[in-house]
Image (cartoon, grey):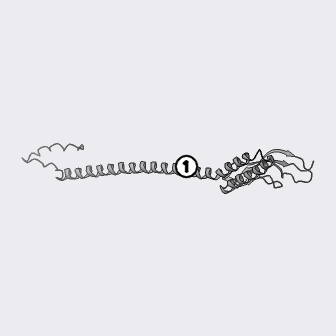
């Protein structure tokens, strides 16, 4: 129910014997009021439905995102399964020929580096390139007579990735040039 203003008080008698007529409200005010109340109710209902749809969409998006993440984790893990298999094979042959383990481990390392490359994280381990603070982390500097200053002379720990997709920079030793 809506609050309506009180009708104006009856006008005073003008002395001519006839009362002045008070202005009358349109007869269909109640009909208009009912239509407005119905429109407001419809808009409120639409707003509630829109909020419920938004909430359901958010929940669906969250579920879908969780599923995509789970699928991606499984995909990455599957790529590492051959590494585990090869390491187990190498350990199984350790008693037969210990030098075969070194060869096997080198092959497993090469396979791991290839998996990282396929995932978009190229290995950074070049020597003789200019030091780049975006790709390298200098852990030491040495004097080398025949190498330009600022040149990578040794990679202590390789880096993986580049730019915004960098897992870690390469830890390197940099030349300071001749003494």
User: Does residue 134 appear in this view?
Assistant: no
In the displayed structure, would residue 9 be above or below residue 72? above
Number of numbered discs present? 1
Which of 160/109 is in front? 109
Quadrant of image for the N terminus? top left
Where is mark 1, residue-wise?
A: 70
Callout 1: helix, strand or loop?
helix
User: Does residue 93 appear in this view?
Assistant: yes
Q: Is residue 174 left or right of residue 107?
A: right
Could you say where residue 20 lies in the image, as x and y percent from the top left? 12, 48
Could you say where residue 92 lies in the image, as x and y percent from the top left? 72, 46
Which of 10/173 is in front? 173
Q: Residue at x 61, y 52 (%)?
A: 78
Q: Residue at x 91, y 54 (%)?
A: 146
Q: Residue furthest left?
A: 17
Q: Residue at x 8, y 48 (%)?
A: 18
Which of 32/11 is in front? 32
Q: Is residue 139 left or right of residue 18?
A: right
Q: Residues within 10 Å of mark 1 (few under 14, many from 20)?
A: few
Q: Is residue 98 left or right of residue 88?
A: right
Q: Residue furthest bottom?
A: 118
Could you say where residue 72 lies in the image, as x and y percent from the top left? 58, 52
In the displayed structure, would residue 5 be above or below residue 146? above
Could you say where residue 56 lies in the image, as x and y percent from the top left? 42, 49
Q: Is residue 13 left or right of residue 90?
A: left
């Amino acid at each position: 129910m809506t609050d309506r203003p009180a009708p104006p008080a009856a006008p005073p008698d003008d002395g001519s014997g006839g009362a002045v007529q008070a202005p009358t409200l349109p007869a269909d005010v109640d009909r208009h009021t009912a239509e407005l109340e119905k429109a407001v109710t419809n808009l409120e209902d639409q707003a509630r439905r829109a909020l419920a749809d938004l909430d359901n969409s958010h929940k669906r998006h969250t579920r879908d995102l969780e599923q995509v993440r789970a699928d991606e984790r499984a995909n990455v893990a599957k790529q590492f399964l051959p590494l585990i298999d090869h390491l187990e094979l190498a350990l199984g042959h350790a008693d037969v020929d210990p030098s075969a383990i070194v060869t096997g481990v080198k092959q497993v390392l090469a396979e791991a580096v290839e998996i990282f490359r396929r995932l978009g994280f190229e290995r950074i381990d070049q020597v003789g390139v200019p030091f780049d603070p975006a790709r390298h982390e200098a852990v030491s500097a040495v004097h080398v007579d025949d190498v330009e200053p600022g040149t990578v002379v040794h990679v202590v720990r390789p880096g993986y990735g580049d730019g915004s997709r960098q897992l870690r920079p390469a830890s390197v030793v940099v030349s300071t040039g001749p003494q």
